[in-house]
Image (tube, helix red, strand yellow):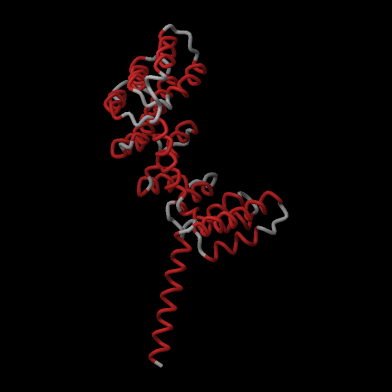
Amino acid sequence: MKKLTLITIILGVFIITNAQTEKENNPYRHTREEYVKTGEEFFESFQKVDCNEEKEFIQNAIDEYYTGVYSIEEFERISSFLGKMYCPKTISFFEEVVKTDTSEKIRCDAMQKLGWLRAKTAVSILLNQLNKDISDYERACIGSSLTIIGEWELAIPVLNSVCFCKDYDIQNKCLWSYYVIGNEPAVSYFNYFFEFSESKLWAAHYLAELGEYEKTFPVFVEAISSGTGINTALYGLAAIGTEEAFQLIREQTQNKNEMIAKTAKWILQYIDIERRKK
């Protein structure tokens, strides 16, 4: 009898451990981590650029900016190349653009590139920009740049000062910044949108990815029941990752809407593929 009890306990521990591993191997519970990891991989590739080899291209691009031949669109195009080159000259160039250019759009584009390049030397310049008479949108750009650079403690108060609003352009800058930062600041931000009926579903999606399962599950169930926003609900259920959530996804593989059925099938297949890798 004792031997049977011991076997039962061991089996129970195995089942629990295996179930925990299954959940941990759910890629939809780690989307944010993968997003941050991809950003780091991009930065590593920018560091591998041979600055001497690209010296002439960089200088020509900078010279053309100072001759005034760039429109806003042309600046964005050329900056998309310079922003992938971790070179002292490109960083200094973008810092100067932030300080002196008269176009808010160009300044914000330069701030974004300084973020991509993890330009620590730009932090003081960005903070000084906050003391100027600038729009809330530009403040969001600064918060976003500080976030990418990795200065989250400096970024959070800047973001908090402008992001809790209904302005789409500002939201667009803020959403992913909070998402990258994660934890309480992100939960607080997405809870703000959770209170509005028109944004509840996508806010629930982000909150589910951040580990807020109990309050978001009913939202996804309601979306499926109403037939509105089912695809978003499916990804949210995947992030929750319980057997009950997976059962709802399985049911949608039979949805008459081919796109929804394909999404449900892909989610289940992708989870299976990732688990087999472990």
Relative height, residue 229 to residue 129 (above, below): below
Split into 4 quadrants, where in the image is the N terminus? bottom left
- Relative to 249, say whether 108 is above or below: above
Residue beneath the point at 55% across and 52% down? 235
Question: Which residue is outermost to the bottom?
Answer: 1
Residue located farthest toward the right when viewing the structure as drawn: 256
> Toward the viewer: 231 or 51?
51
Q: Quarter-wise, where is residue 226 in the image? A: bottom right
- Is residue 257 visible in the rendered image? The answer is yes
Q: Is residue 8 above or below residue 202?
A: below
Q: Could one spot residue 140 in this view of the protein?
A: no
Closest to the observer: 20 or 211? 20
Left or right? Give the position of 235 relative to 179. right
Task: Estimate the x, y position of residue 12 in percent, counting from the top left.
Answer: 43, 77
- x%, y% of residue 129? 31, 23
Q: Residue at x 60, y 62 (%)?
A: 248
> Residue 251: horizontal and vertical position, in percent?
65, 62
Q: Which residue sits at x=43%, y=24%?
A: 109
Q: Position of residue 132 (x, y in %)?
A: 31, 21
Number of marks present in the image shown: 0
Residue drawn at the location 41% of the way across and 16% of the way down: 58
Q: Nearer the viewer, residue 57 or 67?
A: 57
Q: Is residue 120 left or right of residue 257?
A: left
Question: Residue 93 is drawn in which quadrant?
Answer: top left
